[in-house]
Amino acid sequence: MKDIRDKSIVRHEDVIALNFIRDTGDHVFRRHHLNGLRSHIMEVLSSRDVVKENQGVYVNGIQRFPIARPLKMLRIFRKRFSGFEEILDEIRRFQIVRRYLTSTHLALSEEFIVDYRIGNDRDILLCGLQEYVEGECLDPWSVQKDNCLENLAEKLAERPGQGESFSKSRLIQKIEKSVESFVARVKKMIREEQCVPDLAGNRNLLVTLEGNVKLVDINNISYMSSDGCVLMDDFNYPVCDKSVEALSLIELKLLGHKIEKNDPVYLSLLNPERLREVDRLAGRFHQAMRRSALSGH
């Protein structure tokens, strides 16, 4: 039996075979298209909704195939923890982020620790059951003050459920207000806790149909360096520096705020020499990921 943490792809059959999952037939586990380096991410779907998606339903004489909407997202951490205390430290980081961002800006998740059996062996495993958030990606690396808010509003307007009452100008204002709130809360968390979530990854931030900015990836929360060095995560990516840089881009390009050089959040992290070094390290990480993908590992 292969350890689920080592699998490149996890399917429904793999999940229901886990010793801590009870298969009642009510739910289907489907691999989410954005699996992360640190977690398997599975959509938790109603089995009845999956049947409708596959077989279709008749509405006013027309056969439709409604896409099954996830009830929750199941995250299975790939990381092997050295002990119970290391897992608790991981959960404490989640709790810090939850306290500052709250349900307003965070896809809430209930973390749970399980006794995982692999054949005759046993280990502790960390999982999370997270709310499903639907929305448009807020990419810090491509934000433009002139049209990003308008583009986001237009994309959200095209989604089902907005209705005729949709007002683009009102939605733009709501998105901008939510971005301001999100930035303020993250900066407060950095100042008070020296803790920063991963804001640099692909689709880590979403703007919901209601115009609220939410962080959906909480798998790589780091602490700021106390000695000024560039910290690397367990995959040798400078996630802390890159997340702070992403935050500054959102504040500068999306909100039009001036980045103050004496701001303690950005102090020393945004000087040109350090940014060049961080870009070099990030480039080395991406090269390693490409080599790994080509080799099949």
Image: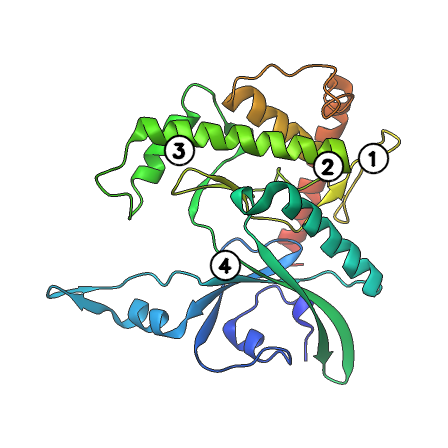
Q: Residue 290, can we see it?
A: no
Determine whether the residue tagged by mark 4 lies in a helix, strand or loop: loop
Residue 160 in percent (x, y) is at 29, 48
Residue on which disc 4 sits? 32
Task: Point out the tag, 3 or 2, that comes first from the N-terminus.
Answer: 3
The disc label shown at residue 43, or none = none
Q: What residue type is labelled 1?
A: Ser
Residues at marks 2 and 4, CA–CA distance in whole angstroms: 26 Å
Residue on which disc 2 sits? 240
Question: Where 100 sits versus 8, above or below?
Answer: above
Task: Point out the tag, 3 or 4, that comes first from the N-terminus.
Answer: 4
Q: In which quarter of the image is the C terminus?
A: bottom right
Task: Point out the tag, 1 or 2, that comes first from the N-terminus.
Answer: 1
Q: What residue type is labelled 4?
A: His
Question: Label 2 crowding class (10 Å Cα cut-off): few <14, some 14-19, many 20+?
Answer: many
Question: Where 115 sits versus 231, above or below?
Answer: below
| Residue 79 occupies quadrant | bottom right
Q: In this view, does 94 lie to the left or right of 224?
A: left
Q: Residue at x 75, y 43 (%)?
A: 222
Task: Point out the tag, 1 or 3, that comes first from the N-terminus.
Answer: 3
Determine whether the residue tagged by mark 2 lies in a helix, strand or loop: helix
Q: In the depicted view, which residue is nearer to us: 135 or 167?
A: 167
Residue on which disc 3 sits? 152
